[in-house]
Amino acid sequence: MTDDLLLSPLHDRHVALEATLGEFGGWSMPISYPAGTVAEHTSVREAAGLFDVSHLGTVVISGPGAAAHVNTCLTNDLERIGPGRAQYTMACNPAGGVIDDMIIYRISDEDLLLVPNAANSTRIVGMLQDGAPQGVTVTDRHRELAVLAVQGPRSAEALTAALGEAADQVTGLDYMAFTDLEGGSMCVCRTGYTGEHGYEVVLDAAAAPALWDALLEAVRAVGGGPCGLAARDTLRTEMGYPLHGQELSEEITPVQGGSSFAVGWDKPSFWGREALTAEREAGPRRRVRALRATGRGVPRAGMTVLDGEGGSPVGTVTSGTFSPTLKTGVALALIDTEPKVAIGDTLVIDVRGRSLPVEVVKPPMVPSHVR
């Protein structure tokens, strides 16, 4: 591992827990812990898991007209939500490709918190600064703030145990709602990337180790433990959630990636609007599909999808893994829209020269419990 990777404020905690560390978006982050990815994945589906996702960016946009400015840039319509709510949205290039997908927290018309992906944070800050009206500031707080996530059916129990007296303010949160604690130095939101009931906490980096310790004790008390980014990936793949750089990229639009729901089509302007509108009207040439293996084998990103045994290529796997929940291989893949592919159809993935039959299924591949 190179010496120039950024370190989470919880790096020492991960080392003490004997985590396997790896590079992710320029950061050294825990990929897994000694229990292993399958155990971590299962703990989230059945109890609770604690993640450090401090590699995610944190950007503060403030000043008169802050919300209005952001709404002319990002895809989703901020007018769909009010203060105290969060929203999934994207930044697109002129061709409609996705520069990044992110969560935005609407504190008020003049104060917003944006959480982009690690590798794209600096670029998103620069894009929002360009053209910002006078009085609107865009501040990168990537190194000043930490982000923790507790996910799973017993996540509320674990979080309330860790927060103590402040727990009453978070237990009744609706999905995609948030509240500020500790005089505004901590934000707790009912969001996550696992498909389970869960919370994400944004707080000052200096305060993160103490909260991690309290949350870890509480998560262990309900039968869970610390989880790395490998489990986060298997969990989100089962749900059919896109990952930037795989199901969304500067070459893969929201229409192709199955994220049209996060586009405010009636808005007069946002980055990439003209290209996306044209693609939506014409129909995309390819679309992300969920695939479940019906034979033995594990699909991986980059593998070719065929229209049948010995058939012609119709797409490429963007994400593939063994599903600990379903006990079989699952994948997301960009599939051509001509010829048409429907739910229930059988395709074949070329797994290093061996044919793996897969069924086209509707995501999520396991039940969603986010609400």
Image: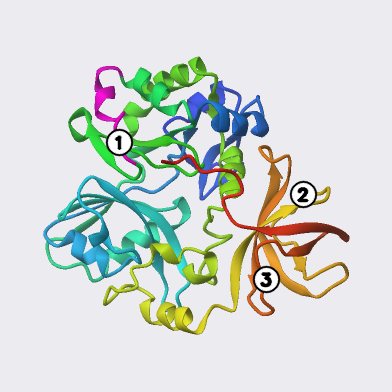
Q: Which residue is mark 3?
A: 341
Magenta residues, start to end: 164-174
In this rendering, the label closer to the viewer, 3 or 1: 3
How many residues crowd mark 1 within 10 Å: few (<14), some (14–19), many (20+)? Answer: some
Between the residue at mark 2 and the residue at mark 1, the CA separation in whole angstroms equals 38 Å
For the rendered model, the colour scheme is rainbow
Between the residue at mark 3 and the residue at mark 2, the CA separation in whole angstroms equals 21 Å
Image quarter (top left, top right, bottom left or bottom right) of the N terminus: top right
Q: Quadrant of residue 124?
A: bottom left
Q: Amino acid at mark 3?
A: Val
Q: Is residue 280 magenta?
A: no
Q: Which residue is mark 2?
A: 298
Q: Amino acid at mark 2?
A: Val
Q: Position of residue 294 (x, y in %)?
A: 79, 51
Residue 37 to residue 223: above or below = below
Asked whether the beta carbons under mark 3 and mark 2 sit within 8 Å of each other, the answer is no
The circle on residue 173 is 1
Q: Amino acid at mark 1?
A: Leu
Residue nearer the viewer, 231 or 340: 340
Image quarter (top left, top right, bottom left or bottom right) of the C terminus: top left
Q: Position of residue 90 (x, y in %)?
A: 40, 62
Q: Position of residue 366 (x, y in %)?
A: 60, 44
Q: Position of residue 163 (x, y in %)?
A: 32, 21
Q: Residue at x 28, y 40 (%)?
A: 178
Residue nearer the viewer, 206 or 166: 166
Residue 123 to residue 37: above or below = below
